[in-house]
Image: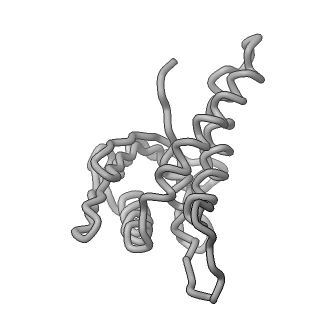
Amino acid sequence: MRKCVIISVLMIGLAGCQTTGGGVSQAPGEPGRKETIGTLSGAVVGGALANQMAEGSDNQQFATFLGAVAGMVIGADIGASLDELDRRMLNNNYQTALETSPTNTAVAWKNPDSGNSGSVKPTRTFYRADTVCREYTQEIIVGGRKQQGYGQACRSADGDWQIVK
């Protein structure tokens, strides 16, 4: 089975999360907020992607389950590895690439403190109900491990790009 990961959904979801020092302690061994959000986001994305890829097959439900499990594992790993600056840099890169980058031109980012990096490359522009949308590929390197994904995003009324697939 071809390994497909939609990192973007996970990362944008994580970009909106902040870890605050609000006096809440975390017990040793418990997942942190980033890891929990990554796990949940990964499960949703992995399940949706697998469901779509297996549409019409006799194994669609099983494929959806496996996709959700794989998404949970990948999402938890990435969520635990990215720090706040990584998430901000990734989100800014994502918005910039989709808004300004010509088709098939990647926009890269790198956090010099963590060493994590990535790029977003729009691959096609299209319209959905009078809304501009773009397909893209994304690569992210966290802790020296490369992950690749793809998706679609459309510009919202406020000008931000929102992932639709």
Q: How many marks?
A: 0
Camera-nearest residue between 20 and 125: 20
Measuring from the top left, give residue 86's x and y in whole percent: 38, 67
The way the protein has been coloured in the rendering is one colour
Q: Position of residue 21 (x, y in %)?
A: 56, 86
The residue drawn where x is 77% and y is 23% is 61
User: Image point 66% across, 50% down: which residue?
Assistant: 129
Which is more toward the observer, 31 or 129? 31
Pick whichever, 116 or 105, lies toward us. 116
Q: Residue furthest left?
A: 112
Taking the image as shown, residue 145 lies to the left or right of residue 153, namely: left
Above or below for 108 versus 151:
below
Report the residue at 61% width, 43% height from top. 72
Residue situated furthest front in the rendering: 28
Q: Position of residue 108 (x, y in %)?
A: 27, 57
Kindly identify the residue that appears in the image at 28 percent across and 62 percent down: 109
Q: Give the side of residue 72 with respect to residue 89, left or right.
A: right
Q: Position of residue 145 (x, y in %)?
A: 32, 44
Q: Quadrant of residue 64?
A: top right
Q: Quadrant of the C terminus?
A: top right
Drawn side of residue 14 relative to residue 102, left or right? right
